[in-house]
Image (cartoon, rainbow, N blue to C red):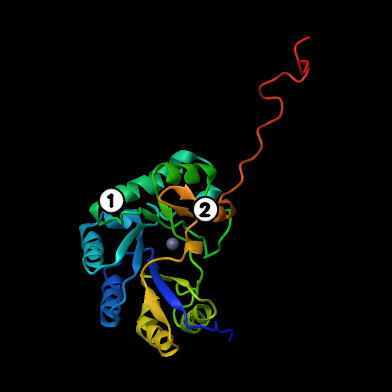
Amino acid sequence: MRVSVQPPEVTLTFDNGPDPDVTPVVLDVLRRWAIRATFFVVGARLTDPAHRAIAQRAHAEGHWIGNHTLTHAGPLGERRDADHAAVEIDRTQAVIGDLAHADRLFRPVGGGGRLGPHLLSAGARDHLAAGGYTVVLWSAVPGDWRDPDGWPDRAVEQCLAQPCPVLVLHDIPGGAMAHLDAVLGRLADAGATFRQNFPRDCLPMRRGVATPGLAGIVMPEPPPPVGSILDRASPARPA
Ligand SMILES: [Zn+2]
């Protein structure tokens, strides 16, 4: 196992909820550990009052609520239409309402946890910038959603290999979160501490302002078609 020299400061994030069965259990575990995290919610789930009540509980207990698109239909960089991004982002922010963090936290849908230009379209980037959003990436993806009993070892290994991991977990059904308490115990035993805020290198946009890391998560635009405006037979300059 590769281990960082210093024990890490771990930031916990939970995506794709809230879920009426799983999220309250996660909140109970976090309360026992006195750890505050961020929940990146799917907007469509919050329209159910019972789900919203769970997000309200999380907010009341000091957790931050972030935006993880309206429908979680796939990475925004795989869609070119700016309207799609606008709806996915802004309708979710509206549903989150007064539970939102002041920095307007937005986590792109990763499509399996990968980082890359598939995360945002140029339209989505521009929309996030205009709306003053803060884009929150991640650096540890143990795959809890696809391996509910096998993810703990990877989570510990990935977290101990870096100074400031941002760990992505999911408060969704499947059984993975039954291991959360044990994973936190293993990390604490290894000397890890927990922080709620995010290391700079996981924030490619802060309150609408891009940082150098942003370009790597935006799908390049195709070049405009040649000759679409000027007739190619025209002289370059007036005679
Ligand atoms: Zn997700």
Query: Does residue 10 sit above or below 221 in this rendering?
Result: below
- At x 67%, y 25%, the residue is 228
Q: Amino acid at mark 2?
A: Thr
Query: Does residue 144 sit above or below 184 in this rendering?
Result: above
Furthest-front residue in view?
A: 6
Residue 83 falls left or right of residue 77 = left
Between circles 2 and 1, the one closer to the viewer is 2
Q: Which residue is mark 2?
A: 211
Closer to the camera in the image, 138 or 201: 201
**Mark 2 element type:** loop
Task: Name the quadrant where ligand 1 sits.
Answer: bottom left
Q: Which residue is mark 1?
A: 95
Furthest-top residue in view?
A: 239
Whether residue 67 can be seen here: yes
- What's the distance in space between the residues labelled 2 and 1, CA to CA? 28 Å
Quadrant containing the N terminus is bottom right
How crowded pointer 1 is (Cα within 10 Å; few <14, some 14-19, many 20+) is rated as some
**Residue 177 locus on image (x, y percent):** 37, 78
